[in-house]
Image: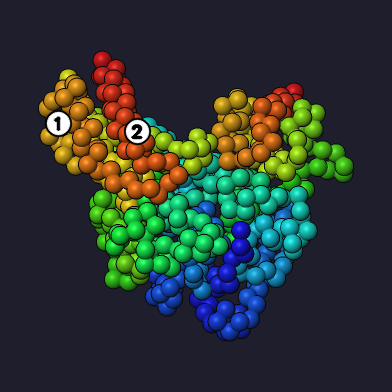
Amino acid sequence: MDCGGWNDPRNGYPMKKILRLSVNGKPREDAVAENALLIDYLRDTLGLTGTKQGCDGGECGACTVLVDSQPRLACSTLAHSLAGRKVETIESLSHEGNLSRLQRAFHEHLGTQCGFCTPGMIMAAEALLRTNPHPDRTAIRAALAGNLCRCTGYVKIIESVEAAAQEQSV
Amino acid sequence: MAALPDFQLLHPATASDAIRMRALHPGSRYLAGGTDLLPNMRRGLVATEVVIDLGGVDELTDLHEESSALYIGAGVTLAVIAANRTVQDRLPALAQAASGVAGPTHRVSATLGGNLCLETRCRFYNQSESWREANAFCLKLGSDTCRVATKSPRCYAAFSGDIAPALMVLDAKVEVLGPLGTRVLPISDFYRDDGITWLAMTPDELLVAVRVPLKTGWASAYEKVRVRGAMDFPLAGVAVALRRENNTIADLRIALTGVSSRPEFVNGLDALAGHPLDDTALAIITRRIKLGIKAMETTLIEVPFRRRITPVLAKRMVERLWEMVSTSLS
């Protein structure tokens, strides 16, 4: 048990600690404040600004990333609670300039309007397709229930996920 | 939203380690899924210098079937509970409640213990610090005046967890670990009718598990009314468990959430045992439910709606379960 010492908040010192985890397939070892949220670690420390800060209170899903292939809200997760885990952000999906099937489907089927909710939508959909490669509309709607699109382009978003699932099964 | 305040993060490996850390830091907070605690901390609602992360306590994620009960550790996530076959087949009210909490992404991290201990909510409380300051704060934090009942000596913030009413009708027991050991209590005794101290747990205790009896012959369900269908806290939530013998009610248990500072078990329904489910019975159910509702203006939706919708929801559910049992018997 560690209590007190140089990193005791009562002494007014910064409380950075080494965090080891994998981000987008690469092992990381960073000095991160104990109270850092995952979203701030990704955006500010690692410069991965594809993950969006929307409501910043767990209500809109814009900051959805994958932790061990499951969708997580980066704004309501402490970075240090993910030691040893595997984090994936929107930046991990394309390879050598080629979009992933979901990214391409969102592009071709107009699943993106202003684009702010798109990274969260795609990561939530990615989590769905990994466990259920052939989801029906109900399953897609359920998987995206926590993601808000303020352009209200939901129909096109659902069609995009359907198209990606069909492409995957070909 | 504001940044998190500075705090020290502790990582216990066992539940008893967590208890010892809490004893060293009496003002600390336990962190499980964090879906409620972290936003609350960022709104300045929770001040603590030490956070105890329960994510590494493996024993809390234990889920197994015993001879006549299901043991669910407090750290089991709501997604795991909702997807569990035993829960789906034998405890439908619990499965429906678990899958009705927030959105799918929340349920992957949110835990059973977190939902059972969920902080009571109020439209004057779950706001930013500047918003609350503009309203001169409230009884729950920072003022001696309750904004929904200005003359009230108590806080009326509403308990809004979905799991508790389901576990009440399923007759579950909770296991609480403290410095002196474990104590077991019926889930109804786990709550107090007060928006500020809504749990009957001392600060040095930790909720570790729930045991839900696996009984036969019961049908159960949970439903809630909310502003936003995709994900929201309940304006009113109803759990029902029913046992039918031929054409009469053998047992009927109903519990409510969102309409009081604690989940409310509806009393007086045992008088219906041996009676058919006719208009008289439904009228008694409605009257008994109305006695259990102590809704105040804690949500933007008005109290009369919440008072009216609760018995309507319960009546529909009881009728549906009644038919469901008769089909399964025939």
Badge 2 marks a residue whose secondary structure is helix
Q: Residue at x 51, y 56 (%)?
A: B127
Seen in the picture, residue B213 relative to B155 is either above or below; the reply is above
Q: Is residue B83 left or right of residue B291?
A: right
Q: Gap between marks 1 and 2, in whole Å?
A: 22 Å
Q: Residue at x 28, y 23 (%)?
A: B319
Q: Kindly tell me whether residue A27 is visible in this rendering.
A: no
- Residue type at mark 1 is Leu
Q: Quadrant of residue B206?
A: bottom left
Q: Quadrant of the N terminus of chain B?
A: bottom right
Q: Is residue B227 left or right of residue A85?
A: left
Res. B272 mark: 1
Question: Disc count in the image?
Answer: 2
Q: How is the image coloured?
A: rainbow
Chain on which label 2 sits? B
Q: Nearer the viewer, mark 1 or mark 2?
A: 2
Percent position of residue A13, x then y: 63, 81
Q: Nearer the viewer, residue A4 or A22?
A: A4
Res. B309 mark: 2
